[in-house]
Image (tube, rainbow, N blue to C red):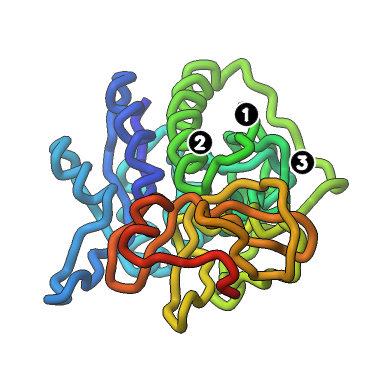
Amino acid sequence: MRIVFMGTPEFSVPVLDALVDAGHEIAAVYCQPPRPAGRGKKLRPTPVHARALELGLGVRHPISLKGAEEQAALAALGADVAVVVAYGLILPQAVLDAPRRGCLNIHASLLPRWRGAAPIHRAIMAGDAETGVCIMQMEAGLDTGPVLLRRATPIGAQETTAELHDRLSGIGAEAIVAALRDLDRLAPEPQPEAGVTYAHKIDKGEARIDWTRPAAEIDRKIRGLSPFPGAWCEIGGQRVKLLASRVVDGQGAPGTVLDDALTVACGAGAVQLLRLQRAGKGAQDAGTFQRGFAVAPGTVL
């Protein structure tokens, strides 16, 4: 098929690669514009932009698709279908209607659960046993369109958002290739009204750990916010990100370090901190962290 690809972050890159490998013609790649990054604040292309250039594909990065000129330029590409994955812009109805067979979105949840911006984070933080990927026919509503294909996968007991992100990206790449191959045979399935939830954008204000909460909830927050924005607490007056953990046996006053293995008492139960990061430092496993910044048993976080 002749495809317009629309995506921006690292999550979208394996999908672009899979479409190219499957032999589809990429009429154009749309992504977010380059943004200032690093100490020098030089403009840095997005991961999709960089990969598209490596593949020799034409790249467009309009700030908006609301203007008639941009909409006409997209329509002129004569695409059979648009594949959209974590693009970052709202698609006006004229854009949704431009490809001959519409726009297909790769969404990282089992719709209608976790519509919206942060489905991977929210699934882990909520303690969901499984998640997955849906290939959805896009319409004007937020992730409301009928689903063409689903792929479910369990969430690991210690899986972080970073790890699940990478798995779901690969699942999405496989699923869209399958959906395009079988497009004439797939029946769009309307989403039920029952079970709708929204994965609201992560607010950095959510990231501070409240040790009076149960261990299972704290563990899910640590894993769900890893690596970004990163759950955090203060240790000895320093702000420290907590990037990996597990629920373990233990009890004590909430926030108290119980042993040299960085087991911390919670409101109910305890968590063991497995990976941490001090401000201005790289992420470290607990053993390495303890050697450089020892946290003694009895310390209150």
* Viewer-proximal residue among 142 and 269: 269
- The image's mark for residue 191 is 3
Q: Crowding near pointer 1: few (<14 within 10 Å), some, many (20+)?
A: some
Residue sitting at x 19%, y 49% = 50
Rounded to the nearest angstrom, the CA distance separating label 1 from label 2 is: 9 Å
Q: Amino acid at mark 1?
A: Thr
For residue 123, side relative to residue 67 (left or right): right
Q: Position of residue 295 (x, y in %)?
A: 46, 66
Query: Which quadrant would residue 84 be assigned to in this image?
Result: top left
Q: In this rendering, which labeled residue sits more in front, label 3 or label 1? A: 1
Describe the element under mark 2 as helix, strand or loop: helix
Residue sitting at x 60%, y 46% = 246
Residue named by callout 2: 168
Label 1 vs 2, first from the N-terminus: 1
Describe the element under mark 3 as helix, strand or loop: loop
Q: In this rendering, which labeled residue sits more in front, label 2 or label 3? A: 2
Residue named by callout 1: 153
Q: Please, is residue 267 above or below residue 193 in the view? A: below
Quick one: quadrant of the N terminus?
top left
Q: Are marks 2 and 3 in contact (CB under 8 Å)?
A: no
Residue sitting at x 39%, y 69% = 67
Rounded to the nearest angstrom, the CA distance separating label 2 from label 3 is: 21 Å
Q: Position of residue 207 (x, y in %)?
A: 57, 70
Label 3 vs 1, first from the N-terminus: 1
Quick one: quadrant of the C terminus?
bottom right
Q: Position of residue 299 (x, y in %)?
A: 56, 72
* Viewer-proximal residue among 246 and 202: 246
Describe the element under mark 1 as helix, strand or loop: strand
Q: Are marks 1 and 2 in contact (CB under 8 Å)?
A: yes
Rounded to the nearest angstrom, the CA distance separating label 3 from label 1 is: 19 Å
Query: Which quadrant would residue 107 be assigned to in this image?
Result: top right
Q: Amino acid at mark 3?
A: Gln
